[in-house]
Image (cartoon, rainbow, N blue to C red):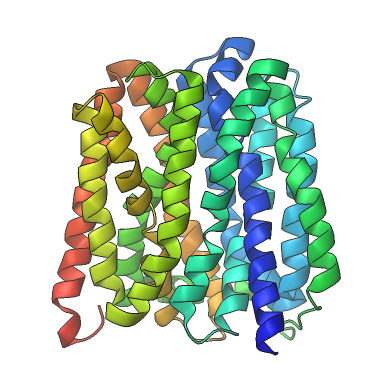
Amino acid sequence: MGWQYRNVALALCTLAFTATMVARLAISPVVPSIVADFAVSKGAIGLALSGMWAAYALSQFPSGVLADRFGERRVILTAVGVTTVASLLLSLSPNYPVFALTVVALGAGAGLHYSVATSFLARHFEQVGRAIGIHVTGAPLAGLVTPVIAAAIGARYGWRTAMLLGASVAIPVFALFWLRVRETPPARPELTLRSRFELGPVRELLARPEIRYTTAMAVGGAFCWQATASFLPTFLIEYHGQSPATASALFSAYFVVHGASQPILGTLSDRIGRDAVAASAFGIGVIGYGTLVVASGLLVFAAIPLVGIAMSWGAPVQSRFIDHLSETERAAGFGLVRTVYMLLGALGSVVVGTLADMAGWMVAFGLLVSLLAIEFLLAAAAASRASSGPL
């Protein structure tokens, strides 16, 4: 595979990730309108969003198994296709139960993409931290424009029209990926799907010290990421008194920094170590989220870039997973660990939404500060022991 094709494939994988993220991120800026339309609480919307992220997490392991059996290209195309259909159906939801079920279906379909695309890239790029760092910019790339556009469309035409953003991006990406990315041969076509879901190998992989420790690092980070993606605009509106337009602009600014810092942190992790870079990201998060909780005025604006850097923890931490998985394990193995840490992290939406309803935003976002402090200690401990061998 030549370098030009590799770069095209990397770009299209990133765009596919962007498409699946646009559909999900279009929901957050219009949460107040959805709450009002369906006459439900923020906790109820948080429950639906947690269901979406849980379904997204649960899709990770099966996606890797399917890629081993049928090839990455087919699985990625399926993810983008399901995203398109779910986005269209969201705009037609007649009530909250249908909306919630469709949101969960959106998460399940979108979840087929990431692990498969990551294993595909890891097989073709030596500097895996850099490749993963570029790939994960699909999320902040979506976040750069989605909040502002979704908020504007929602204000003018209603939240249902805003839900169509996902389909409008996914359709051309599907076509480009279909035309430009070659069919990928399955890595393990001889294995039956049933054999890949046997509990013994699953338990063995998750029990490895390196995988277990990295999963612990990822859980808190994923919890904070999910909560931020679900409620940062609403937090800025209700806790800091920002207008919806300003809150959406700050949400976009968060994703700008998030996108710019992902490749940087990934490249740094290739050069100076995964744990040191992860610890730096989590430590910056303690400062950023702490400022959002206790400060006001211009300090809120200054905290947003710190939050963006903090939520780029995925580049070093995910690369740490790849470092400890063999080439034949990467698709299903990385999908498995992503299912575990994202399933637990998906609780971020419902926990933070419920805490906001019951105790206020200070308590809700204060929880994120505490979790990031724990993640900082975990990563810092791993960095300090790096010289004695991998954990």
Residue at the (75%, 71%) spot, across then down: 73
Residue at the (47%, 46%) spot, across then down: 255
Quick check: can you spot residue 15? yes
Q: Position of residue 191 (x, y in %)?
A: 70, 82
Q: Is residue 268 left or right of residue 337?
A: left
Q: Is residue 98 left or right of residue 127?
A: right
Q: Position of residue 27 (x, y in %)?
A: 60, 31
Which of the two residues, 142 or 38, is positioned nearer the viewer here? 142
Q: Is residue 356 left or right of residue 32?
A: left
Q: Residue furthest front?
A: 298
Q: Is residue 304 above or below residue 308?
A: above
Q: Position of residue 246 (x, y in %)?
A: 45, 25
Q: Is residue 384 above or below residue 327?
A: above
Q: How many marks?
A: 0
Quick check: can you spot residue 208? no
Quadrant containing the N terminus in the rendered view: bottom right
Residue at the (32%, 20%) spot, across then down: 240
Quadrant for residue 196, please give it: bottom right
Residue at the (49%, 39%) spot, across then down: 252
Quadrant containing the C terminus in the rendered view: bottom left
Q: Position of residue 320 (x, y in %)?
A: 37, 74
Quadrant for residue 375, please give it: bottom left
